[in-house]
Image: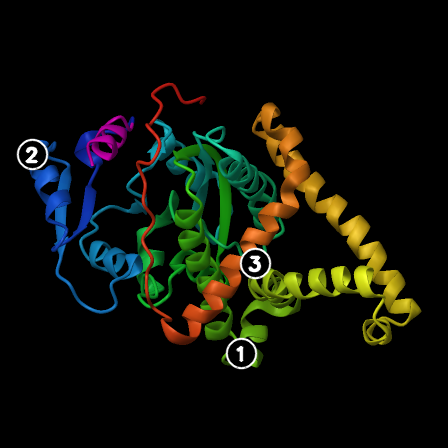
């Protein structure tokens, strides 16, 4: 809480036009007491949320949205450190973008990319996602799966959409799809919010499985009526939705199956496995394995180069290990989707001491 208040107080924006809502759960007494002890500036408002189902971030955000007074609003997570001029950049961006843009997403990066091998992979993934994938989707006018923080909204548009889905554990992804279905757009701006990358494996798996579960939830919710979704998005964006929102968790679930088949065949030369791969299918599989793996490794290498994470480049050759972890998270997500669909696994932060001199 002290770090959050300090980071948000540094925002270069007229304080008489700034409203910062700190959303806290009523039974989180330690956080509430800490906030009270900080002698918060007048533009901070503490919003204490009474326990009620579902206990999720989007439910809290909807309560906060009901209190928003500004023309624009933005979401920050508790560990965020946005660049000091980010709000001003967002205002300028809204004034320059084309009509129909209702959300401008800032880029998310990790300040502790060198903590261990896991954070190196995580930082490269984020660098690629927020510097290549999302800007590309935005420029093509395709649905943009928002990041969970630093997305700047026109308040009226967010209210018209009904805010966030309180039951979705990746409310940002779902909201990006609903923006697209409304015929609106998302753009990416060149401003960074620094976050802390998970450096503990179990903590990372908890967060990752929640994200993948949210992809699954979003896919099934929007595919309740495929014809209506096709009508809302159009054929190109409909296919984009299938590949990105549906294909992401599906790939992670299928990967171990194909890995196991490949290993078993290499060891046993099983005739049964051979029957599954007639020559044309086998040839395509080999090309996919060699070329596909090369492209995806090159993909994260590019992310490292863009963010000047040069020391991490060599480690990206071990990226397949990261894919294994993703598949573990995917199967955990599938189990939770069936048995605990709206359970929000919180992510612990503050595991690494925050650096003051973050590269900006």
* Real-space Cα separation, disc 2 to disc 1, in angstroms: 51 Å
Which residue appears farthest toward the right when viewing the image?
279
* Marked residue nearer the N-terminal end (2 or 3): 2
Farthest residue toward the front?
A: 268
Residue 172 falls in image quadrant = bottom left
Q: Which residue has dot 1 on it?
A: 228
Image quarter of the N terminus: top left
Graded by Cα atoms within 10 Å as few (under 14), some (14 to 19) or many (20 or more), the crowding at tag 3 reads many
Quote the CA–CA distance across marks 2 and 3: 43 Å
Judge left or right: residue 98 versus residue 139: left
Q: Secondary structure at mark 1?
A: helix
Q: If the image is split into quadrants, where does the C terminus sit?
A: top left
Tag shown at residue 327: 3
The image quarter in which residue 150 lies? top left
Q: Which callout, 2 or 1, points at the residue further toward the start of the chain?
A: 2
Q: Position of residue 218 (x, y in %)?
A: 47, 67
Q: Position of residue 183 (x, y in %)?
A: 50, 62
Relative to the observer, which residue lies in front, 22 or 276?
276
The stretch in magenta equals: 1-11
Is residue 187 shown left or right of residue 46? right
Mark 1 and mark 2 in contact (Cβ < 8 Å)? no
Query: What residue appears at the point 25 percent right and 34 percent down from the top-left corner?
Result: 4
Q: Secondary structure at mark 2?
A: helix
Q: Is residue 8 magenta?
A: yes
> Which of pointers 3 and 1 indicates the residue nearer the eye?
3
Residue in front for this viewpoint, 8 or 211: 211
Q: Secondary structure at mark 3?
A: helix
Residue 88 locus on image (x, y percent): 36, 31
Residue 179 lies left or right of residue 140; in this view the side is left
Closest to the observer: 5 or 266? Answer: 266
């Amino acid at each position: 809480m002290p770090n959050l208040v300090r980071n948000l107080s540094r925002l270069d924006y007229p304080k008489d036009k700034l409203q910062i809502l700190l959303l806290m759960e009523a039974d989180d007494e330690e956080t509430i007491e800490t906030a009270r002890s900080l002698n918060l500036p007048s533009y901070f408002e503490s919003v204490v949320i009474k326990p009620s189902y579902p206990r999720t971030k989007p439910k809290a955000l909807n309560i906060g949205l009901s209190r928003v007074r500004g023309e624009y609003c933005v979401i920050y997570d508790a560990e965020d450190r946005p660049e000091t001029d980010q709000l001003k950049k967002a205002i300028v961006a809204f004034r320059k973008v084309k009509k129909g843009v209702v959300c401008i997403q800032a880029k998310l990066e990790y300040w502790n990319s060198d903590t261990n091998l896991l954070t190196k992979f995580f930082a490269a993934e984020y660098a690629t996602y927020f510097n290549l994938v999302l800007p590309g989707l935005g420029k093509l006018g395709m649905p943009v799966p928002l990041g969970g923080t630093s997305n700047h909204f026109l308040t009226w548009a967010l209210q018209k959409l009904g805010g966030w889905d309180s039951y979705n554990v990746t409310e940002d992804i779902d909201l990006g799809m609903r923006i697209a279905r409304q015929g609106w757009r998302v753009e990416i701006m060149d401003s960074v919010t620094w976050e802390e990358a998970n450096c503990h494996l179990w903590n990372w798996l908890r967060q990752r499985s929640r994200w993948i579960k949210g992809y699954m939830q979003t896919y099934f919710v929007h595919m309740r009526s495929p014809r209506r979704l096709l009508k809302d998005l159009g054929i190109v964006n409909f296919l984009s939705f299938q590949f990105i929102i549906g294909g992401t968790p599906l790939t992670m679930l299928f990967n171990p199956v194909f890995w196991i088949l490949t290993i078993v065949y290499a060891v046993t030369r099983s005739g049964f496995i051979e029957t599954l791969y007639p020559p044309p299918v086998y040839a395509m599989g080999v090309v996919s394995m060699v070329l596909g793996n090369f492209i995806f490794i090159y993909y994260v290498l590019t992310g490292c180069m863009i963010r000047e994470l040069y020391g991490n480049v060599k480690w990206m050759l071990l990226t397949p290990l990261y894919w294994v972890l993703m598949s573990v998270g995917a199967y955990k997500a599938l189990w939770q989707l069936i048995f605990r669909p709206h359970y929000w696994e919180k992510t612990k932060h503050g595991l690494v001491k925050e650096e003051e001199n973050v590269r900006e």
